Amino acid sequence: MSRTLSTVLAAASMLALAACSGKQVADAALPPAAHATPAPLPPTPDFGPPQGAPIHAVLTSPPNVPPPIHRNYPAKVIVELEVVEKEMPISEGVSYTYWTFGGTVPGSFIRVRQGDTVEFHLKNSPTSKMPHNIDLHGVTGPGGGAASSFTAPGHESQFTFKALNQGIYVYHCATAPVGMHIANGMYGLILVEPPEGMPKVDHEYYVMQGDFYTTGKYREKGHQPFDMDKAIDERPTYVLFNGREGALTGDKALAAKVGETVRLFVGNGGPNLVSSFHVIGEIFDTVRQEGGTVEQHNVQTTLIPAGGAAMVEFRTQVPGSYVLVDHSIFRAFNKGAMAILKVDGPENKMVYSGKEVDSVYLGDRAEPNLHAVATAAKANAAGTLSKDEQIAAGKQLFTGTCSVCHQANGEGLPGVFPPLANSSLVAQLAKEDKTRLISIPLHGLTGKVNVNGKAYDSVMPPMTQLTDDEVANLLTYVLNSWGNPGGQVTKEEVAKVRAQPAPAPGAEH
Ligand SMILES: [Cu+2]
């Protein structure tokens, strides 16, 4: 053995010894003196042996949080969590094969009391194809439980830990390839309440961000497989709250009344992105950043690391729709990272004059109103897509995409945005140059154009975020609305034009 190697080994075994004895000290004199946390440690009896009959933990599906714990002694708490692999919608008309803890993304919310002894049962459904395990960040021990919980399909593992530290912790699967298991939705939160409990609030909600990688584009219809290359390059197709676009909008929005207090447990499963968590129109009165014990006040946006969580609290003042976003804002508007907190109650003109935020910010994302889009996608896949279905889908897509400039009624804005309603240019292109018409949303439009006798010399940006069938449906809707001449554009025609170079600006008749 070389001298350097033996020195290294000796040093390593000394380190191991030091770690070992440190652990023994901690075990003997709980709360653990070895923890370098500045937080005041709770009275020792809370770390004694579990008392009373074992308790079965109440687990909840997002956005629900189990009720507060009102116990004044440490107990043995049994947690039973089942891993289920299942196909679910990731967006309207788009499905994805998720791997879940408890059948939801994020996984079931677990709530225990600091000092509790948690007997953890991890089951892997017999219908699973993969082995899984669990790493709970609230566990002190190798792999946070991962080393003891590797579970094959149809099997169950059991391990026990003492909840030494209070806080809100992420749990996730740590089976190789770890990134893929997390990207498929294998994460959730466990709250370790302090012995004295948490301050009472009117609502507690569970929200967790995650990034998703599909082979198709954002909102590309049909079943979308996981894309490992995009995941490695950290180029997500979706960034979502609670695992699907629209999980918390429309009739699934979070709810509160004016004057109530709201506590959000906000986690970030990653696997890659850090979240700049923000609620449009609210200021966080209190944030427990990174889920720690230090309270920060009057915060606009809080960073939530991948594999981290925060508790944010605020009191609502004014009714309306408050939009939860990742303020890395393309993620909100182009990848789905948007949720709604709907606050009902009387106006308070002293605080705010009125007028809703959601039409400004949300467009077609405020309500899960893309059913016609999904119907069209299904019909398209089945080869039975009708013009009427395309028109219905196009109408829904028009809001928040084209309507921003051309207005919902297609009239445009005088001198700024040309009308699509009864447009001489749309009529002309529909008859003479369909390729050019299709290229307008795909490649944008610049240079002089004449519509209904009026000249425009402006810029329409390319709408490259739209998929082929979205463009086809949008144009079919425009062609069949507001006195335009009718006609149809297919997904295949759009694909062909997309592959061609953009026409030169001003090459208009
Ligand atoms: Cu897994």
Image: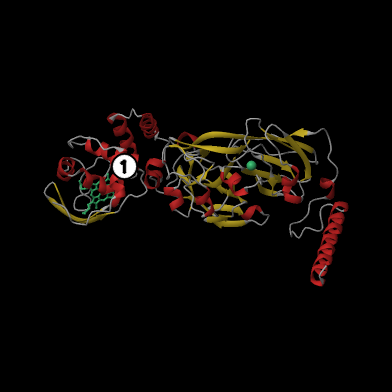
Residue at the spot of label 1: 471
Is residue 75 toward the left or the right of residue 489 in the image?
right
Label 1 residue SS: helix
Q: Find residue 126 and report its image quarter.
A: top right
- Mark 1: few/some/many CA within 10 Å (<14, 14-19, 20+): many
Please state which of residues 24 and 505 is positioned toward the viewer in this rendering: 505
Location of residue 506 in the rendering, given as x and y in whole percent from the top left corner = 18, 56
Figure check: 219 above or below 459: above
On the rendering, which quadrant does ligand 1 occupy? top right
Location of residue 496 in the rendering, given as x and y in whole percent from the top left corner = 29, 44
Location of residue 336 in the rendering, given as x and y in whole percent from the top left corner = 46, 45
Location of residue 325 in the rendering, given as x and y in whole percent from the top left corner = 48, 49
Is residue 226 toward the left or the right of residue 422 in the image?
right
Figure check: 1 above or below 179: below
The outermost residue toward the front is: 1
